[in-house]
Amino acid sequence: MRFVSGAAVQDSGIIRHPSPVAAMARLPILELDIVDLASDGRGVARHGQKAVFVKGALTGERVRAQLIKPHRQYDDAVAIEVLQASPARVAPPCAHTDVCSGCSLQHLSAIAQIELKQKHLIDSLERIGKVAPQRLLPALQRETLGYRRKARLSVKYVDKKNAALVGFREDNGRYVADIDRCETIDPRVGVLIAPLKLLVGALSVRRELAQIEVAAGDRVALVFRHLAPLAAEDRELLRQFGALHGVEIVLQPGGIDSLTTLDGSAPSELRYAVEDGLWLSYRPLDFVQVNDSVNRAMIAQALELLDAGKDDSVLELFCGLGNFTLPLGRRVGSVVGVEGDAGLLERAARNAAQAGLDNIRYAAADLAQDHRDAWWAQNSYTRLLLDPPRAGAEHALAYLPGSRIQRIVYVSCHPATLARDAATLCARGFTLAAAGVMDMFPHTSHVESMALFVR
């Protein structure tokens, strides 16, 4: 049997994967038929009375799998040899896919990935929400490599190796994967993993560096979270690295408000365009949508589904920096954006002012609380846009939407909470007119989706 570290190899028509660690050798190797894919991208097989979840296996394949962790109701395994390959199997574009947990679906074709996510969305709506969309929205899928403009890279100095590791975690979460580049991060940063490892290893605070945040907009900023003061030599090494690679070095000695440049000044803001001629400014640690091309397509689709014009008033909850609010302000009579992060809201208001949009008002509110008596909740609107975090919009939907709202667009990053909230809206007189997925995070099992509700 032939294995190549970090990648599957083709040998006499049989695809083989790297062998698991020797510690697993005492557990059995199983020959399994994969009948389905779980929501996290692992293959699903049956062995006796138990389900077996197999990393690296695809529906329709027959594999040899190493059992890695038995449970009472199911087992975890990893494919070590693919005896019969799926037509959807492709060669992973990254050499580190077998050690890095940043991506779990690189061996699955892009078309099959989006089909898997669509299936997960519909299954969640039907199983949890007991609802089904009247039609499916076109799947939004754009670039699948070099798309991440935000990332948090773990940092670890390993004394035994006398070297630093920079990247994402391994599957077990305890160790930082040993990688030299990343194919999914913005190319301006993805090629800098190896140089960053050398830089970290040369710093006196190499054991006190917790992480490096990547922020890639019109410029690139790297935020170094350091738990000990930097020496003068450290600052000079960082300065040289920034100058050589054309990135801004930002220091974070404390909380998110402690950011400074190497000379002690406040970091300059980055920018990205939400549509032609409309830019959002943001700070390096601000939340922004990770995938630029999908974000633009997502905004365009949301505007189309809302079908709002100059006679409409729109309420947007969880508005952030104004990713949807500003494009809406160009098209409708008035917009109110509500957000719990006061810093994001301040920058959203500034973005609106810089765009010359005076028909947008903002309100700060923790949307996990009841705000039915707030001025913005008592206003009258014809449209509602929701873009909540994973927890969904359950609390806001206890007192919204108002009776005049005819159309709701719900942007979700978690199918289960969307399904729960869909059931609430449908029980209150709305129809789930359409739903579909957006491949915001290609090669991962993360599902971003959009749903349209019509009264």
Image (cartoon, rainbow, N blue to C red):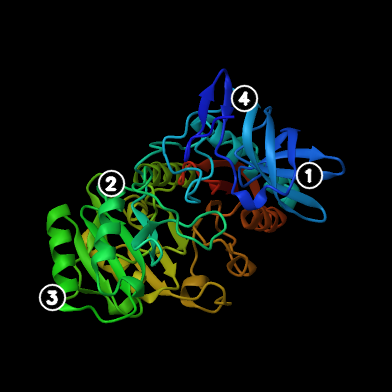
Q: Nearer the viewer, residue 83 or 372?
A: 83
Real-space Cα separation, disc 2 to disc 4, in angstroms: 31 Å
Q: Is any atom of residue 12 visible in this view? A: yes
At x 47%, y 40%, the residue is 6
Residue 160: x and y in percent read: 41, 64
Task: Check the image and report above or below for 88 versus 99.
Answer: above
Q: Name the amino acid type tagged 2.
A: Val
- What residue would you read off at disc 3? 263
Query: Which label sits on residue 171?
Result: none
Compare marks 1 and 2 and give the one earlier in the sequence.
Answer: 1
Mark 3: few, some, or many residues within 10 Å (few <14, many ≥20)?
few
Mark 4 lies on a secondary structure that is: loop
- What residue would you read off at disc 4? 85
Mark 1 lies on a secondary structure that is: strand
Real-space Cα separation, disc 3 to disc 1, in angstroms: 57 Å
Real-space Cα separation, disc 1 to disc 4, in angstroms: 20 Å
- What residue would you read off at disc 1? 51
Mark 1: few, some, or many residues within 10 Å (few <14, many ≥20)?
some
Please say if the residues under marks 4 and 3 sit with CB atoms less than 8 Å apart. Answer: no
- What residue would you read off at disc 2? 191
